[in-house]
Image: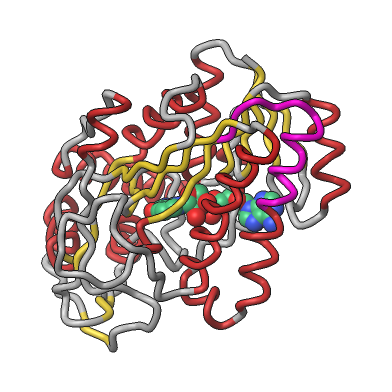
Amino acid sequence: MKVLVTGGAGFIGSQVVDALIARGDSVGVVDNLSSGSRRNLNPRARLYVVDITDPAAVEAVFAQEKPEAVSHHAAQTDVRRSLADVPFDARTNILGSIHVLDGCVKQGAKNIVFASTSAIYPETQALPIPETHPLQPVSAYGVSKMTVENYLALYKLAFGLRWTAFRYGNVYGPRQDPHGECGVVAIFSGQLLAGATPTIFGDGTKTRDYIHVDDIVRGNLLALDGAGDGEVFNLGMGREVSDYEVFQGVAAALGSPVMPIFGKKRPGELDRVCLDITKAQRVLGWSPRVTLAEGMAATVAYYKKGAAQSGAKG
Ligand SMILES: NC(=O)c1ccc[n+]([C@@H]2O[C@H](COP(=O)([O-])OP(=O)(O)OC[C@H]3O[C@@H](n4cnc5c(N)ncnc54)[C@H](O)[C@@H]3O)[C@@H](O)[C@H]2O)c1
């Protein structure tokens, strides 16, 4: 199958690309390399360094590639930046996504899989949260992802485009940016390996539903093959894990005695997240396979190896 992956040089997108190429698919990648990197990119993928906010450039890639299916991962992913610069977030995540949807319709792609987020849910004690829970994002990032879900439904109705949206929990694993704003497994690993003291924003009790990137990739392949048409699915472990538990896990894996600093809670963030994943289990036959303990150990080992290699080079 011919697949176009937007954001295919990023943390998750690059691993979707690897899995597609490993099973023999032909893959084009659209990425402006703003947070992604050529280092992540499979050498057998065709890279177009294009910004999804440029409709003509996006359409030209679609015309060249003529993909049958699209995996849409390109996005501005920083929750705090989404509140600091709402127009930038909306231009990238809403208008950019519309350009990708238009590319599908104009150039004959049949199916799109969209990386949505659990950040579209409100604060709730009704955990785990099912997909049917009313949506009320507390960040512009969440609003933009929710808006694109609505456009997906519209593009199916108006133009017959098939789609699946995944509301990811907190995805972790190799290639996540340890210097970024998101992804505490990567951030704590990077900081502890650099000899810095990690800061936990809040009192450490904030919870998220962590899910390993390999499980996310498996869900994406099912949907790219046509499962779950016109549906939204939560992808997580269905388990709450606190910031402090993650810190302890990373510190234990590194054998570090360092204790974190506790900083002020940041705006735009929920206190608790735990996803109801029974719909993905029932409809897609998808279940998480990587346990948190295995996934954290492998991820920390990945960063340790990277730190050792860059230390050896330097
Ligand atoms: N990592 C998570 O925990 C998580 C959770 C929920 C949803 N998501 C979603 O999954 C997707 C991938 O996230 P990630 O964690 O791999 O982030 P990432 O930053 O590693 O990947 C995003 C990719 O998109 C590219 N990009 C950004 N703006 C672009 C633009 N204007 N034009 C073209 N390319 C652009 C970046 O260069 C990068 O390669 C995003 O849509 C994100 O919102 C991620």
Span shown in magenta: 97-112
Q: In this view, does 27 lie above or below 239?
A: above
The residue sitting at the bottom extreme is 264
- Residue 181's spot in the image, x, y percent? 44, 68
- Residue 47's spot in the image, x, y percent? 73, 34
Quadrant location of the N terminus in the rendered image: top right
Q: In this view, does 203 lie above or below 276?
A: below
**Would residue 310 be found to the left or right of residue 131 on screen?**
right
Residue that appears at 30% across and 41% down = 212
Q: Which of 181 and 125 is in front in this view?
A: 125
Q: Nearer the viewer, residue 62 or 28?
A: 62
Q: Which of 228 and 70 is in front in this view?
A: 228
Q: How many marks?
A: 0
Residue that appears at 65% across and 25% down = 110
- Residue 314's spot in the image, x, y percent? 50, 54
**Would residue 268 be found to the left or right of residue 244 on screen?**
right
Most prominent secondary structure in the magenta stretch? helix
Residue that appears at 60% across and 39% down = 8
Q: In which quarter of the image is residue 133?
A: bottom left
